[in-house]
Image (cartoon, rainbow, N blue to C red):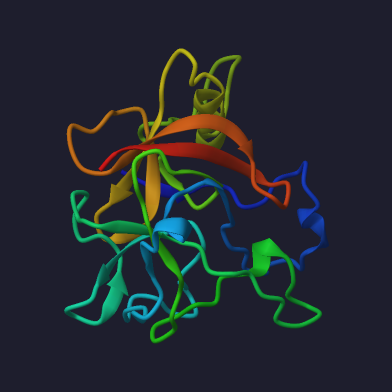
Amino acid sequence: MAMKRFPLTSANSYSSKYRPGEKLYATLELNQVAFPKTGMVVSQTPLGDEFTLAAPCENGMWVVADKAAGAIKSPAAATDKPIGIVYTTEKEYDIFHYGLQTFGRKIAGDYPRVGLLGIGDTVTTNCLQYDDTEFKAVTSGDNQKTAEEALFDALKAIETTPLYVVPVAGSAVPKITATKPNSGIYAKVVKFYTVPNGEPGVKYQIISL
C-alpha cells in the first residue's frame, strides 16, 4: 500500500505564483455544518507531539481531542470517537506567505479550532489522501494514466460508483476509498469540486458516526 496526498496544486490554478519547493497546505470550506451553532467545538486542547514544522496540522484534518491526555491527536483507529475536523482561521503571516495554500503552521503546543463532526455535515476540502493500489496507474496500452488521474476519473464517476471518505489509523488526513465501511465515522463524496482558492477539491457529507 502506498498512500499519497490529494494534489494541492493544479496546472489550471494560479499555483505558479508560488516559489519552487514552497510547502503548500490543504484548505477547507464549511458548506453546511452544525458545530458552530451547537457549540460542539474544541479550542482549548493543544496539538500533540506528532505535529511538527515538517508535518504541521492543516485545515480539513480529522483529529481526536484526547482531553484526558491533554492533546489533540490523529485517530488511533478508524473507529475512534468523537472525531472532529480542523477549521482554524486562515492567517496572512507576511508578504511572502499569503492565501489559503500557505496556511498550515500549527504545531505541537498550538491550539487549533476543531469542530466535532455530525451526520449531515458537509464540507469541501483537499485535505485528503488515497491508496495508489486502489486507484492504480495504467502504464501500458493506449489509455495510460497516473494514479492521480485514476483517482480523478473515479471522482468524476461518483453518480454510478460511489466513493467514501474514511479516517486512517495513525494519520490525521482522511482517505478516499470505494469501499463502504461497516462501522465508524465516514462520509460520502458528493462532488468533485474546487476549494476556495481554485485548486481541485472534494465535497463530502458525513453519513455515519
Residue 89's place in the image compared with 141, above or below, is below
**Quadrant including the N terminus:** top left
Instruction: Identify the residue shown where x is 76% and y is 55%.
Output: 15
Instruction: Give percent across and percent down for residue 194.
Output: 66, 41
Instruction: Identify the residue shown where x is 50% and y is 65%.
Output: 58
Q: Residue furthest bottom?
A: 109
Residue 152's place in the image compared with 184, above or below, is above
Residue 23's place in the image compared with 75, above or below, is below
Instruction: Give percent across and percent down for residue 86.
Output: 45, 63
Image position of 54 (left or right of 41): right
Count of numbered tags: 0
Q: Is residue 132 visible?
A: no
**40, 49: nearer the viewer:** 40
**Quadrant including the C terminus:** top left
**127, 196: nearer the viewer:** 196
Q: Is residue 163 visible?
A: yes
Report which quarter residue 186 is drawn in.
Answer: top left
Instruction: Give percent across and percent down for residue 72.
Output: 31, 73
Image position of 183 (left or right of 33): left
Image position of 116 (left or right of 16): left
Instruction: Identify the residue shown where x is 53% and y is 38%.
Output: 203
**169, 61: nearer the viewer:** 61
Instruction: Identify the residue shown where x is 24% and y is 55%.
Output: 169
Instruction: Give percent across and percent down for residue 200.
Output: 64, 42
